[in-house]
Amino acid sequence: MDIPRIFNISESAHRIHNPITPEKLATLGAALRLESGTRVLDLGSGSGEMLCTWARDHGVIGTGIDLSPLFTAQARRRAEELGVADRVKFTHGDAAGYVSEEKVGVAACLGATWIAGGAVGTIALLARSLRAGGILLIGEPYWRQLPATEAVAKGCLANSIADFLMLPGLLASFGDLGYDVVEMVLADQDGWDRYEAAKWLTMRQWLEANPDDAFAKEVRANLTSEPERYAAYTREYLGWGVFALMPR
Ligand code: SAH
């Protein structure tokens, strides 16, 4: 069980696999007023930076599930490095349908809402693990500018304009599902650069170390085209944020 290889290569040096920065992740942890001992569930936990830093800074107890064995191993190493291995547990597996045995105070999915068919399904899935009074966290893209054509949406690697909403529409959609939006931390273009541009050097170094790998052609093509595609489309059109929700 694994994710497509391109991500295990291009994001192998990322601690955060999203346009949110370490500073903004810390802002989010502080904004939620987390109490020591709060249980946090993270579906698609990546390399574990959210759970590990919040365990260190706020004393939370975390469980993360991720489909990438590489990212899961990195998350466990990060927990050791930050001295929180007794507080956070990372499991390699499919998070689709995952419901925690013990209810949690924070149930999160940041940038992996396809695990339950989109934001609506992921909110319903996370809600099954949430204790009364708990908070859901959803990390999701939105349009900063509405694409004028479907070709622009495709340039952003979306299937169509209909894949995402503008920010007010996205916030309204949470209300329509019966949730109050109680906090949000939004990424900015510098954060997008940290997520996207950081892949380029990683790909270049991988190509130099693996010139004869059968996958090198695909990585080379990606490195050649990505900077321009990213600057023309994703950087200009796509926003991203983490939204904190509580059922009404
Ligand atoms: N939340 C993390 C990772 C976001 S990237 C962060 O912000 O850093 C999306 C993550 O979802 C990747 O780590 C990928 O391995 C994971 N993923 C993809 N499909 C998954 C699935 N079905 N179950 C669990 N994790 C999945």
Image: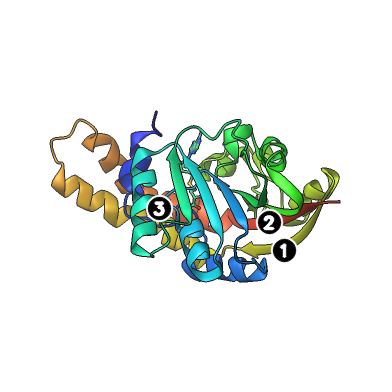
Residue 171 point in image, percent of width and height: 77, 54
Checking the image for residue 220, the label placed there is none
Seen in the image, is 176 located left or right of residue 71? right
Badge 2 element: strand
Mark 1 or 3, nearer chain start: 1
Q: Are marks 2 and 1 in contact (CB under 8 Å)?
A: yes
Residue holding disc 2 = 243
**How many marks on residues?**
3
Residue 31 point in image, percent of width and height: 66, 70
Mark 2 or 3, nearer chain start: 3
Q: Is residue 13 above or below residue 9?
A: below
Residue holding disc 3 = 228
- What amino acid type is highlighted by mark number 2? Phe
Residue at coordinates 30% horizontally, 44% vertically from top-left? 9
Disc number lying in front (2 or 3): 2
Badge 3 element: helix
Residue holding disc 1 = 183
Seen in the image, is 155 located left or right of residue 5? right
Q: Is residue 67 above or below residue 139?
A: above
Closer to the camera, 197 or 119? 119
Q: Are marks 2 and 3 in contact (CB under 8 Å)?
A: no
